[in-house]
Image (tube, rainbow, N blue to C red):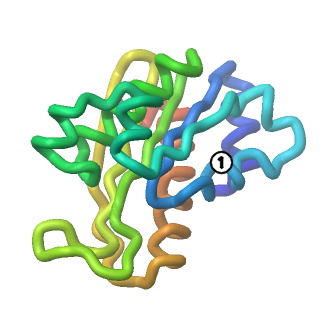
């Protein structure tokens, strides 16, 4: 599944996409925007690398960050909802994780949380990619997010 295929499906379904990235630092946006004509589907995205940016740009609650930490499904959901609010899109995905190097016993390297917001419904999951190295975790997270967008565009996530 590649970005061009996803954009074609969303175009046919009349879906607009927005994204929020943290640990991938724009890789997902780059993948979506490299296809000519992407702007009729891909409305934009936010790279909210710091907690302060997540709060200021995506309306993530300070309380959520304090209670769960930036790498959590709760924050991923609020990020995705913030994208929908800011860009008025039908489908949003968010990515927040620990690409490495390092991590902790509580939140190890390779843990990435994803949030989806689709027409008012929200969903999240955590994927443990493992200590693959920073670049490989980021690539895996980008690819996983593309897959989630693909599934959500087909209604698979919320069945």
Task: For mark 1, give the secondary structure.
Answer: helix
Which of the pair 42/55 is nearer the observer? 55
Left/right placement of residue 156 relative to residue 106 reads right
Residue 103 in percent (x, y) is at: 25, 75
All told, the count of numbered labels is 1
Q: What x and y, as percent, mark residue 79?
A: 39, 35
Position of residue 9 relative to residue 144, above or below, is above
Q: Report the side of 84 relative to 89 (left or right).
A: left
Q: Is residue 126 above or below residue 117?
A: below
Residue at the image position 45 percent from the left and 17 percent from the top: 119
Q: Compared to 126, does 73 lie above or below?
A: above
Which sits in the foreground, 36 or 86? Answer: 86
Instruction: Please name the residue shown 40% across and 70% down the image.
Output: 99
State which quarter of the image contains the C terminus: top left
Question: Based on the displayed image, in which of its 4 quarters is residue 62 positioned?
Answer: top left
Query: Would residue 93 be seen by someone viewing this image from the given angle?
Result: yes
Seen at 55% across and 61% down, the residue is 143
x and y percent of residue 12 in the render? Answer: 73, 26
Q: Quadrant of the N terminus?
A: bottom right
On screen, residue 13 versus residue 75, left or right, reads: right
**Toward which corner of the image does residue 14 lie, by quadrant?**
top right
Classify mark 1: residues with Cα within 10 Å, few (<14), some (14-19) or many (20+).
Answer: many
Residue drawn at (37%, 81%) of the image: 101
- Disc 1 designates what residue? 29
Q: From the top left corner, tell me how far across and down residue 74 is, in percent.
A: 22, 39
């Amino acid at each position: 599944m590649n970005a061009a295929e996803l954009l074609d499906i969303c175009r046919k379904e009349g879906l607009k996409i927005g994204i929020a990235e943290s640990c991938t630092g724009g890789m997902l946006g780059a993948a979506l925007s490299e296809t000519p004509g992407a702007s009729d589907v891909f409305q934009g995205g936010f790279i909210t690398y710091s907690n302060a940016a997540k709060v200021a740009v995506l309306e993530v609650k300070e309380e959520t960050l304090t209670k769960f930490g930036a790498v959590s499904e709760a924050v991923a959901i609020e990020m995705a909802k913030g994208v929908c609010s800011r860009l008025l899109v039908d489908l949003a995905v968010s990515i927040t994780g620990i690409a490495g190097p390092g991590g902790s016993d509580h939140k190890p390297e390779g843990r990435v949380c994803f949030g989806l917001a689709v027409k008012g419904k929200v969903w999240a999951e955590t994927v443990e990619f493992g200590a693959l190295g920073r670049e490989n975790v980021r690539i895996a997270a980008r690819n996983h997010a593309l897959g989630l967008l693909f599934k959500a565009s087909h209604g698979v996530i919320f069945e």
